[in-house]
Image: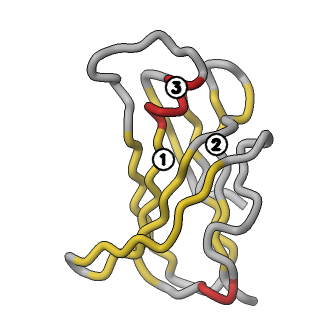
Amino acid sequence: MTGYLTTHVLDTARGCPAEGLKIDLYRIDGETRTKLKSLVTNDDGRTDEQILPAAEFAIGEYELIFHAGAYLDACGTPPEEPRFLDIVPIRFGMSEASHYHVPLLLSPFGYSTYRGS
């Protein structure tokens, strides 16, 4: 089996997929953090392509940065200064060549994640 990484974002406050949310992917090597790519979620709250496809997959530590504040602003969520959730980082490890799915369940005042399938 070949490894790859996917995600999706659900807006739990509005009860719908989070469309138009920017996500950055970083590889973590000790103290070094290298940006690999940026993607934006589609109308299903998913990226149009795998975040890390099989051809680019490597075991290691990664970080997804979800730009929640900009998404909430674009949705018309009443603004706060500063916004309670702006940037949501999720750092995780991939230890084997398999499908890693790291979703984000988001609301203006909380979030959760898990290893999905």
Instruction: List the residue tagged with mark 2.
Output: 9
| Circle 1: element type | strand
Residue 87 to residue 58: above or below: above
Tell me which numbered mark, 2 or 1, is placed earlier along the sequence.
Answer: 2
Marks 3 and 1 sit apart, C-alpha to C-alpha, by 11 Å
Tell me which numbered mark, 2 or 3, is placed earlier along the sequence.
Answer: 2
Q: Which residue is drawn at 30% across and 82% down?
A: 29
Image-based side of 82 in relation to 110, left or right:
left
The label shown at residue 66 is 1
Residue 83 to residue 112: above or below: above
Q: Which of 108 and 35 is in front in this view?
A: 35
Amino acid type, mark 3: Leu
Image-based side of 107 in relation to 86, left or right:
right
Amino acid type, mark 2: Val
Residue 41 lies, in percent from the top left, at: 67, 47
Q: Nearer the viewer, residue 87 or 73?
A: 73
Q: Residue at x 63, y 70 (%)?
A: 5
The label shown at residue 47 is none
- Residue farthest left in this picture: 31
Instruction: List the residue tagged with mark 3.
Output: 72
Name the colouring of the figure: secondary structure
Amino acid type, mark 1: Phe
Residue contact between numbered discs 2 and 1, judged by CB atoms under 8 Å:
yes
